């Protein structure tokens, strides 16, 4: 499987960019200091929050030094993959949960010791979706935070459209009607302001896959996750519904103002669907007056998508570096770290008791995401980027190539099934 993973990427190994594992050094006093390396992708609020946590952790553990390194998101997977065959890289690493099957099978991560990370304790304390990180009775990673989706609405644009700025849509029908009231076009039919996101490159592909398909009575995958099951009437209806938001209802378009995040931040999009991680970014924009609501129901059905980034320990970490890495992992998955993560970034605490505290569960912004976790599903992605791309291509096939909805969905299902087969057939 190591050869399979290495073959997924065209790798140029730059040794100066990759740390070797941890090391032990002498401090200025008599105490030995054990150095470990932590990797995550670069996101400003995440970087600064981890830096804060590292300072706090080192103050409590003066015999441990944590070196924090980040990489651009687009390069992160390649950097991680480069360290697999080389036996170098971090001691503790932040990975998207959907990547875990590949990295576990590639023998890159080691299981967390059950005496330190007891599975029954984890399952009583953490949200159920964290079980995606459990293989053969042991956990290979744990998150600080979990995510779900919600509807963001611009209160000022609601007011301008004659809508109640404090009353977001509860049903999909209400969402479509309100979005239509917000849209503005110039004399040539170009959007000046859109009502609703259409960006499959963002979180809309999760909304389509895990919410709309289910709301139309279908399932995106078989129970074991190995088979695509949306190439049927429910999948066709869900995709048709999404496409017609643009073609028939004219509520918006993909890549308006580059992307939906930019458009919403600029006050040019009435509503968008995004993750709880976006709160930290949006709250920095003083002129943006927005609210957050649960995803609207359709046909009386509520659904949501949940996901998480988890911290694991690399296979080559041992000895004093392993003990230091476990201490650090325990620290960054503690309630103290989760509260800081929520306040700085907006991602939800992974521990149920903390997330369900009244001040969080009833919070005007966090609350919608926390309530959404109760009916959320988490897809076990094998290749998240490729599995997202099949839906982007399907959308383009309909709009640019005049392909039928059914044919576009069937092709997407065939392409995604090939991704799943490539992985599962080599297990």
Image (spheres, rainbow, N blue to C red):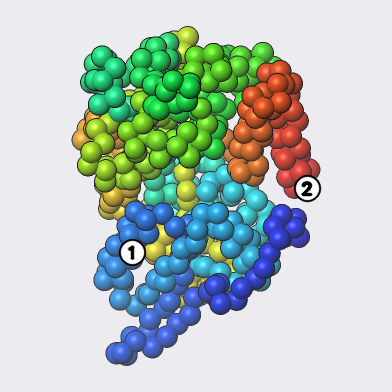
Find numbered disc 2 in the image and state the secondary structure of the residue it sits on: loop
Q: What's the distance in space between the residues labelled 2 and 1, CA to CA?
A: 39 Å
Looking at the image, how many numbered discs can be counted on the residues?
Answer: 2
| Up-down relation of residue 232 to residue 146 (above or below) | above
| Up-down relation of residue 65 to residue 156 (above or below) | below
Find numbered disc 1 in the image and state the secondary structure of the residue it sits on: helix
Residue at horizontal 65%, vertical 71%?
13
In front of the other: 36 or 39: 39
- State whether residue 119 appears in this view: yes
User: Going by the picture, which residue comes out furthest to the front?
Assistant: 187
Q: Quadrant of residue 59?
A: bottom left
Residue 273 point in image, percent of width and height: 42, 30
| Up-down relation of residue 413 to residue 214 (above or below) | below
Q: Which mark is residue 251?
A: none
Q: Residues within 10 Å of mark 1 (few under 14, many from 20)?
A: some
Where does label 2 land, which residue?
426
Viewer-side label of 2, 1: 1
Q: Quadrant of the N terminus?
A: bottom right
Residue at horizontal 25%, vertical 26%?
156
Residue at horizontal 67%, vertical 27%?
400
Residue 101 point in image, percent of width and height: 63, 48
User: Going by the picture, which residue comes out furthest to the right?
Assistant: 425
Q: Residues within 10 Å of mark 2 (few under 14, many from 20)?
A: few
Residue 103 point in image, percent of width and height: 62, 55
> In screen coordinates, is 233 left or right of 360?
right
**Labels 2 and 1 touching (C-beta < 8 A):** no
- State whether residue 295 appears in this view: no
Where does label 1 land, which residue?
51
The first of marks 2 and 1 along the sequence is 1
Residue 328 point in image, percent of width and height: 39, 64
């Amino acid at each position: 499987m190591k050869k399979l993973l290495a073959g997924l990427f065209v790798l140029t190994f730059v040794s100066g960019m990759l740390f070797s594992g941890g090391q032990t050094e002498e401090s200025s006093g008599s105490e030995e200091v054990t150095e470990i390396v932590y990797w995550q992708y670069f996101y400003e609020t995440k970087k600064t929050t981890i830096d804060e946590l590292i300072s706090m952790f080192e103050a409590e553990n003066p015999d441990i030094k944590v070196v924090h390194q980040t990489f651009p998101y687009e390069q992160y997977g390649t950097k991680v993959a480069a360290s697999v065959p080389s036996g170098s890289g971090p001691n503790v690493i932040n990975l998207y949960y959907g990547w875990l099957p590949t990295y576990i099978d590639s023998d890159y991560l080691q299981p967390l010791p059950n005496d330190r990370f007891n599975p029954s304790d984890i399952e009583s304390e953490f949200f159920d979706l964290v079980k995606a990180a459990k293989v053969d009775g042991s956990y290979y990673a744990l998150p600080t935070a979990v995510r779900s989706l919600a509807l963001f609405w611009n209160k000022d644009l609601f007011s301008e459209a004659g809508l109640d700025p404090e009353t977001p849509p509860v049903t999909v029908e209400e969402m479509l009607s309100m979005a239509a009231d917000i849209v503005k076009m110039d004399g040539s039919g170009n959007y000046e302001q859109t009502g609703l996101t259409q960006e499959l490159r963002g979180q809309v592909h999760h909304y389509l896959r895990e919410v709309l398909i289910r709301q139309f009575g279908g399932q995106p995958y078989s129970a074991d996750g190995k088979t695509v099951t949306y190439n049927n009437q429910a999948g066709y209806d869900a995709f048709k519904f999404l496409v017609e938001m643009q073609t028939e209802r004219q509520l918006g378009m993909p890549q308006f103002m580059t992307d939906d995040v930019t458009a919403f931040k600029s006050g040019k999009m009435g509503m968008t669907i995004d993750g709880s991680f976006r709160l930290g970014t949006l709250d920095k924009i003083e002129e943006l007056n927005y609210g957050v609501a649960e995803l609207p129901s359709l046909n009386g059905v509520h659904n949501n998508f949940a996901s998480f980034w988890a911290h694991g320990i690399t296979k080559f970490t041992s000895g004093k570096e392993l003990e230091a890495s476990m201490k650090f992992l325990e620290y960054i998955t503690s309630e103290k770290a989760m509260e800081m993560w929520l306040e700085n970034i907006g991602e939800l605490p992974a521990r149920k008791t903390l997330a369900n505290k009244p001040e969080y569960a009833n919070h005007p912004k966090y609350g919608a995401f926390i309530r959404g976790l109760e009916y959320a599903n988490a897809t076990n992605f094998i290749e998240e980027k490729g599995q997202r791309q099949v839906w982007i291509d399907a959308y383009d096939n309909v709009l640019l190539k005049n392909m039928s909805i059914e044919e576009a969905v069937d092709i997407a299902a065939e392409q995604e099934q090939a991704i799943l087969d490539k992985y599962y057939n080599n297990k």
